[in-house]
Amino acid sequence: MGALPQHLVNGLTVGSLYALLAIGLSLTYGVLRIIHIAHGAVYMLGGMISYTLMVRFRLPPLPAIALTLAACAGVGVVFERWAYRPLRTAPIIVTLISSLGLLLMVENLARIAWGPLTQPYPQFVSLRVYALGSVIVTNLQLLVLALGLALMVALQWCLRHTQVGLATLAAVQNPRGARLCGIDIDAIALVIFAVGSGLAGLAGILEGLYLTSVDPSMGQIFGLKAFVAVVVGGLGSIAGTMLAAYLIGLLEALTAAYVSAGLRDVITFALLVLVLMVRPSGLLGRRVDRA
């Protein structure tokens, strides 16, 4: 048990990545009632596009990251206009199938463009190791933790103190009522897809930096775990999603350390089943009516 603090730090680091990816999913479902499985593909594009800009086009890290985030936000907007808006009134199973098709299409296009092999991600931040007692923390872990927490705090501030944020919260809590109050749901949807996709792209960049590699399949399991965080936290609950993302990260780290690394994914999806059985609305969720 002496290594417990170390495993907790590792779990919180991965939880930050899950949270960055899951927030976009939570907002999307909250406003549009869409299960955006293709969000994992945007996360993958964040890693692969930034890799291409830095390695093949030799752009410095900051311009490459800025262009990547803009590209991911643009992909999210295209998804909303092309794949989801025409299906706004369709049954949820139709949008789910459309999202799954998007995920498979983008992943296969990525394999054609970059090949199926794992690519070494450029380490543009020099690795440094700090010893805090018995806990070893790298500067990359501190970067992921600090950036993840800062962005989530900034997002919460924007949601509660800006006109667009308040309109988004109103749409999340009651899409039909927000529409009747004159809130432009289409405009809110575009903002949500752009911001959520940008965060997903950033999570892809951070994972490439943290794990030192990227590949066209990286969005599948990571996207599914982010979706688990949304369901466990409560569909449409941003705070619940963040809580669940860190909980999953911690569970995976502790499972890998004390049980078996091969059971990490099993524990994550077992948590999903358990929460659905005991509390179907999620940890902090509440029942919402379909718009």
Image (spheres, rainbow, N blue to C red):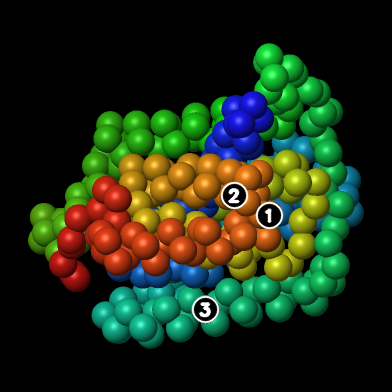
Q: From this viewpoint, which residue is outermost toward the top?
A: 133
Measure the alpha-carbon separation of dots 2 and 3: 29 Å
Which quadrant of the rendered structure holds the N terminus?
A: top right
Taking 191 as reference, is 119 left or right?
A: right
Q: Are marks 2 and 3 in contact (CB under 8 Å)?
A: no
| CB under 8 Å between discs 1 and 2 | yes
Tell me if 109 is positioned left or right of 118 in this view.
left
Identify which residue, 7 or 126, lies in the foreground: 7
**What residue is disc 2 on?**
255
Callout 3 amino acid: Leu
Name the spot of residue 88 as percent of width and height, x first.
31, 76
Under tag 2, what secondary structure?
A: helix
Amino acid carrying mark 2 in the image: Thr
Quadrant of residue 17 within the rendered picture: top right
Q: Nearest the camera: 146 or 170?
A: 146
Instruction: Please provide percent x and percent y for residue 175.
Output: 19, 61
Q: Residue at x 16, y 67 (%)?
A: 289
Mark 3 vs mark 1, CA separation in Å: 28 Å
Quarter occupied by the C terminus: bottom left
Q: Nearer the viewer, mark 2 or mark 3?
A: 2
User: What amino acid does circle 1 point to?
Assistant: Ala
Question: In the rendered image, is residue 190 in sight?
Answer: no
Q: Residues within 10 Å of mark 2 (few under 14, many from 20)?
A: many
Residue labelled with disc 3? 100
Circle 1 residue: 261
- Crowding at label 1, few (<14), some or many (≥20) Cα neighbours within 10 Å? some
